[in-house]
Image (cartoon, rainbow, N blue to C red):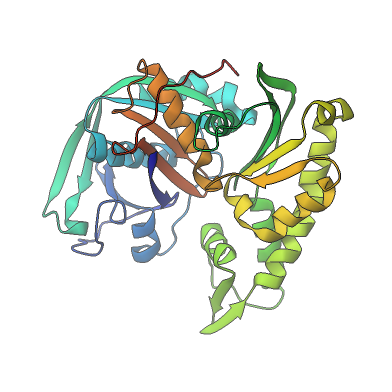
Amino acid sequence: MFKTYTFPSVFEGNITDLRNVSPDLINGLKIFHNGEGYVIGNLALTEGVSPHRNINAAPDELDYSLLLKSGLLVANQKLGNPLSVTTGFPFSTFQLYKETATNLINTSHVIDYDAATFGGGIKKSVQVEIDNVQVIPEVIGCTIALRKGIQNVSGNFFVMSLGYGTLEGLLSTEGGIVQRTSLSTYGLRYAVNLLEKELAKQYYLELKTEHQIDAAFQKGVIFLNRKRIDIKPLRDKVLKQYYEDVISPAMRKAFNDNDFTISHQMFLAGGGAMYPALVDCFKQEFQDILDLEVAHEPQTLASKGYCINSSQLNGGVKSNAVGLDIGNATTIVSVFDENNLVSETSIPAEY
């Protein structure tokens, strides 16, 4: 139904002549912005020294602009022009950034990039035209994908989006979301920072950036002073602490007994749903209350919901619909798989 293209949400300034260092565009992103070159995503991790990104950055900040250009470039290479784009922000910043982000995206973009990184020869320039754009809350993207995507969920359900910068949640009903239940609090970064502090008690972390620590957090292994250190037990410990200190109290504040009366399902989405230790914490709390399920491909769920929304902006046309999730840890571009398109469905007005 969808094709997704993913790269880490990190960048670093780079003036080096990089040639044939990656197999393709998605792994060889080098963007020029105001005359300066920047390596993005996987290329920043392999060729950079200190790849980074501000957490929950505003649309007018450098890192958001670079990741936006990168996402639009990838989408343009797959679909051509014009594009219909949906993206999102956490509930906590949605109203603050919605107008600025819409204005930033809804224009003609001239994107300069270095094609030599993947054997393309020289610096190139592409113009990306935008037909439609909409900015929605991230967790709404998840609910759209759950209802209108591959799982085709009906009825009432809770959804928890476990992102790196922010954790989001709410109760979704057939008639729309229950606004009172929306919650937004610290994301997985809380647990990653806990792990970093614990590691620093025993090891010199060699000036590693937060995103490099997160990459090790995901793998469960970190290399320090040429030693391979298994951090899975420590990762499980800090994830449990994160759940007890942050997630559970936030849900207790947002969801009441009446909410559990009308819904017996909860779906987990986002990168945090990939950690069994964190999923187990949800199961232990709600084992006698509701059915808990990790959404299909949870990390890309919001992006796919954005893509479905984009097709509706364009009257149901899927051929130029793009879902762009500029996450704090990962940027994800979703488009429809032209070889596996599904019938049109309408989207309920949930926001």
**Residue 36 pos. (x, y %):** 27, 46
Which residue occupies 45% across, 49% down? 9
- 290 or 58: nearer the eye? 290
Query: Looking at the rendering, which quadrant does residue 80 occupy?
Result: top left
Q: How many marks?
A: 0
Residue 56, placed above or below residue 192: above
Residue 306, placed above or below residue 66: above
Q: Quadrant of the C terminus?
A: top right
Residue 277 visible? The answer is yes
Q: Quadrant of the N terminus?
A: top left
Which residue occupies 77% across, 54% down? 281
**Residue 144 pos. (x, y %):** 54, 28
**Residue 136 pos. (x, y %):** 53, 24
Left or right of 335 in this view: 25: left
Which residue occupies 60% across, 32% down? 153
Query: Looking at the rendering, which quadrant does residue 158 occupy?
Result: top right
In the image, farthest residue toward the right:
257
In the image, farthest residue toward the left:
121
- 108 or 331: nearer the eye? 331
Residue 162 visible? The answer is no
Left or right of 268 in this view: 134: left
**Residue 269 pos. (x, y %):** 60, 43
Which residue occupies 52% across, 57% down? 211
Residue 160, placed above or below residue 17: above
- 146 or 24: nearer the eye? 146
